[in-house]
Structures are given as C-alpha cells and as structure tokens.
C-alpha cells in the first residue's frame, strides 16, 4: 500500500503542470470541497494558519482582476479562482483562539496551556506589520503547495500566479476592511485540449545539481 501511494504521488506530480489555458469545464462542488479540506491540513507555524483562501467563482470579479494580473486571462477563464491572502488581524487574538480550540480537542489546560500560549505569543506578538505579512505569506505558500498536490491527485489542474498587482487585488476585493492582504492567486479547473504546454516534457534540475548534502 505504501509503495502504491508513492507511485500515485509521483504520477500526479508528473501529470501536473502550470496550465496556460483552461477549458470551460467546471470543478464539482464535491471535488472543490475535498481540495479545500485537504489544504486545511497543511502544516503551519504553531498551527495558527495566518491566512485565508478566497474562492472566487463570480465571473465579473474574476474579469476585474485580469488587469491587476497584467492581462493574464486565465485569471478569468477558469473554474474557480483561489486567492491566498494573509490574515493581518491581531496575532494575540489568533493565539487565544487557537489555544481555546486546542484545549477543546486535547487534554491540555491550566499551567501547561498557559505555557503553550506564552511560547506562541513570544514568537508572534511583537512582529511589525511587514514582518507579520512576510510570516503569513510564508505559511500561505506552504498551503499553496498542499493545494497543488491535492488538486493534481484528483486530476484537477491549477496554476500559481504570482505575477499580480497585490495592492490592486486588495482594492478590488476590498480586503482592507477584513484585515487581509493578497499573497498569490491560483486558478483551478481543467486543461484545455489545445493547451500545448500540457504536452511538453517536464524539465527539472538533476538531483545531483539540486541537492547539496552537508555532513
């Protein structure tokens, strides 16, 4: 079973690519929900998950975001557009909420719970606004990686799009009101049969060039 799982993962990773053109097919709600549920299980610092996933299916909103994506029409022509955004709300409140949730699901309370909260607060509560954004963005990128693998395992295509004007996204999506900031966009859907990039051989560095062994 373990060997089969590894083979399946390798197959999915070899199958996926950065889609240039999506078809008109729509990802079912069931499969979308599965992707989101699995992405929710991504690792994150202290388990705080300082980001959110905006799932956009409204065509008008997606079309407005094309100009803020330097004309990349796959931002509009897809099944769903997922935008990873940094949660810029109070880190202290994040820790308090997480600690409460943790205590409800685990046998931890009293001094041990207080000590856990203090450790977390010492790490995140003193960050500047820009430090918080960078930290939250790093966590969002980890979740993006999970989403890409989950989507590929379902034969659903995805394409991370970092070439965007994040501040324009913030304005169009009115994120300031929600203490959110755009990190990266990722349209999902199904590849168009005329997307020739799907038939190109995958090119990656050889392992000996990529990996540096220390010690």
Image (tube, rainbow, N blue to C red):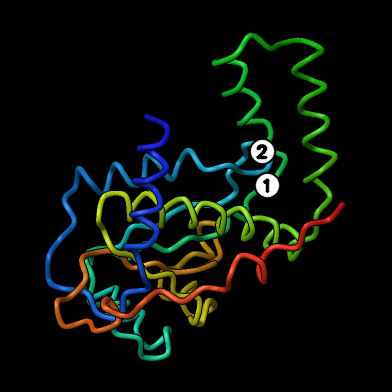
Say above or below: 111 vs 186. above
Say above or below: 3 vs 177. above
- Give me the disc on residue 142: none
Instruction: State which quarter of the image contains the N terminus.
Output: top left
The answer to whether marks 1 and 2 mark residues whose Cβ atoms lie closer than 8 Å is yes
Q: Residue at x 26, y 78 (%)?
A: 199
| Residue marked by disc 2 | 93
User: Badge 2 local density, few (<14 within 10 Å), some, or many (20+)?
Assistant: few
Instruction: Compute the Cα span from label 1 to label 2.
Output: 5 Å
Q: Residue at x 66, y 26 (%)?
A: 99
Q: Residue at x 24, y 80 (%)?
A: 21
Measured as percent of width and height from the top left, residue 124 is found at 78, 46
Q: Secondary structure at mark 2?
A: helix
Q: Residue at x 74, y 66 (%)?
A: 130
42 sits left or right of 64 in the view: right
56 sits left or right of 22 in the view: right
| Residue marked by disc 1 | 90
Measured as percent of width and height from the top left, residue 198 is found at 27, 76
Say above or below: 117 vs 29. above
**In terms of image quadrants, where is residue 128?**
bottom right
211 sits left or right of 33 in the view: right
Q: Secondary structure at mark 1?
A: loop
Measured as percent of width and height from the top left, residue 28 is found at 16, 51
29 sits left or right of 94 in the view: left
User: Badge 1 local density, few (<14 within 10 Å), some, or many (20+)?
Assistant: few
């Amino acid at each position: 079973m373990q060997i089969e799982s590894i083979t399946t993962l390798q197959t999915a990773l070899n199958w996926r690519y950065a889609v240039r053109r999506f078809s008109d097919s729509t990802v079912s709600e069931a499969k979308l929900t599965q992707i989101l549920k699995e992405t929710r299980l991504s690792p994150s610092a202290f388990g705080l998950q300082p980001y959110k996933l905006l799932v956009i299916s409204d065509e008008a909103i997606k079309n407005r975001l094309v100009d803020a994506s330097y004309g990349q029409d796959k931002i509009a022509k897809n099944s769903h557009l997922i935008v990873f955004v940094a949660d810029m709300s109070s880190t202290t409140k994040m820790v308090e909420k997480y600690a409460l949730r943790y205590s409800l699901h685990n046998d931890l309370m009293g001094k041990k719970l207080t000590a856990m909260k203090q450790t977390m607060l010492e790490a995140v509560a003193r960050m500047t606004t820009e430090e918080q954004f960078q930290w939250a963005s790093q966590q969002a990128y980890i979740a993006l990686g999970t989403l890409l693998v989950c989507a590929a395992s379902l034969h659903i295509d995805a394409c991370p799009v970092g070439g965007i004007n994040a501040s324009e996204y913030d304005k169009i999506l009115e994120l300031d009101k929600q203490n959110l900031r755009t990190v990266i966009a990722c349209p999902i859907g199904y590849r168009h049969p005329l997307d020739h990039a799907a038939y190109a051989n995958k090119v990656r560095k050889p392992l000996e060039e990529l990996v540096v062994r220390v010690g």
